[in-house]
Image (spheres, coloured by chain):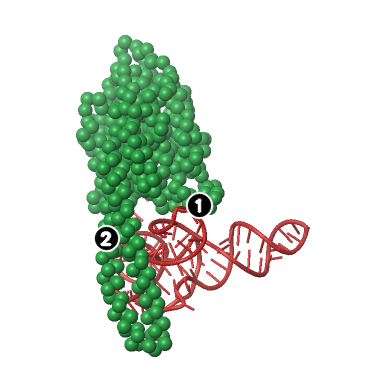
Amino acid sequence: MLELTYIREHKQDVIRRLGIKNFKAVHLVDEIAQADAERRRIQKSLDDILAESNQAAREIGILYKSGRVDEAGELKAKTAEWKVRSKELGEKLSETEQRLNDLLVQLPNLPHPSVPKGFSAEHNENVYQEGNFPQLYPGAMPHWDLIRKYDIIDFELGNKVTGAGFPFYKGKGAKLQRALIAFFLDSAVKAGYLEVQPPLLVNADSGYGTGQLPDKDGQMYVVTEENFYLIPTAEVPITNIYRNVILTANDLPVKNVAYSSCFRREAGSWGKDVRGLNRLHQFDKVEIVQIVHPERSYEALEEMRTHVAGLLHALELPFRIMKLCGGDLSFTSALTYDFEVYSAAQERWLEVSSVSNFESFQSNRMKLRFKDQDGKTKLAHTLNGSALALPRVVAALLENNQTADGIKVPEVLAEYTRFDMI
RNA sequence: GGAGAGGUGGCCGAGUGGUCUAAGGCGCACGCCUGGAGAGCGUGUAUCCCUCAAAAGGGGAUCAAGGGUUCGAAUCCCUUUCUCUCCGCCA
């Protein structure tokens, strides 16, 4: 969430910049300002009363010790009123705090000044593109047919055992998955990331920390018995490692990489464009996370962008990088690059990675801070990106590399798969 | 899952209702001392909120978390949670 002091001092700026995200903030910002003022007013009264009663309690103690019981009794009688009053104020305070917080979490992050205006994906800005669209041989087919032909991914089996969107990977299909994961992890470790294996289920606090809750509640699978959430991305457990943590300036930058399965309900988004591997309820992803000094977060964003581009380049896939426009930018992000690979048989661009700078939006909610050189405690900036999500990369690899004699495995992967044709 | 013992500052650890404004130690920072280092000596060493133009100062909150008893709670009571030991189950 946004920092309250920033909203307090830059109301107009907040409203204007959220306008770029097509978010009408006028009313909300006003309500926040009111709740904030009220909260401070109540706290002042409460603190004053508590100061008085603390003073009286100390005096009573001294009176008892010196045997002046009558005087102590008189003073005690006086405290009764303060007690009632402070209880009232305490309740009002937490109520107002709760209201203020409920309002604050409704405000999206401010977009970076370079974010283009726009309402949807068509207004995203293509900032980089490489590779040629492959010329497919006459019998070429989309990946949902290829996986059947070579019997490497089985959706029917997934339907039987679980349901739609939970496929089985078999034989070379399973090995291809393993190879991609290993390649992605190794690349990140080479780039200085610490490899971490996170839990796949998290508690509600973690969901709030990274912003999945409350706004994307319906997108996560819930284990109701324990009130756990299945992670939609490794970003959630990894970033939450640092919830309520104060790092030192020397700890920065923190660079973590994690492979995990990801679980998404994708409620309401099922349709014709999501056949095969294009959209799944369970999929695999390698995620990179950085926690950096606020002054260096855009540098880190570019570094991550270069890293992800390097992976796609190594896989020899044609891809482009889109800078998201205001309307397409997520609730929590200040600046996002989407990576899209070209899937030749579908003749479509498929999003395989999203690299974002959240600035202090996540860290404010999570209380992720660091002690700077000047001795002050400040909010760190957080960033993350997929490096990469597997299913659509697999879809593109299968479609783009198909030949009459089978599917070619890119050279970098063959080291891991130990086969070069499917 | 059952039984028991616990959770105190960056760490160890004292503290069973009133200067706890949390002893003492370790660590860390700075200063003195030293040719230099160490030892020694001294000083400092959390977070959040309010007040203040700012700084200083002042006030409030925090001893796992939440609630309660009391004029007053680290200390007493309740709930939750986590850790450890033993038993059970188990990849």
User: Which hue is chain B drawn in?
Assistant: red
| Same chain for the residues under marks 2 and 1 in the image | yes
Task: Identify the subunit bearing mark 1.
Answer: A
Chain that the image shows in green: A
Front-lying residue, A224 or A215: A215
Q: Position of residue A345 (x, y in %)?
A: 31, 18
Residue that lies at the very extreme toward the top in this rendered image: A138
Figure quadrant of the C terminus of chain A: top left
Horizontal and vertical percent position of residue A287: 41, 37
Q: Which residue is mark 1?
A: A376
Which residue of the protein is positioned furthest toward the bottom in this rendering? A67
Q: Nearer the viewer, residue A193 or A53?
A: A53
Q: Residue at x 29, y 28 (%)?
A: A119
**Do we see residue A150 in this rendering?**
no
Disc 1 crowd, CA 10 A, few/some/many (<14, 14-19, 20+)? few
The answer to whether A141 is drawn above or below residue A195 in the figure is above
Give the structural element (helix, strand or loop) at label 1. loop
Residue A300 rendering spot, x and y as whole percentages: 48, 36
The relative height of residue A295 versus residue B26 in the rendered view (above or below) is above
Q: Which residue is mark 2?
A: A92
Give the quarter of the figure containing the N terminus of chain A: top left
Residue A411 visible here: yes
For label 2, the SS is helix
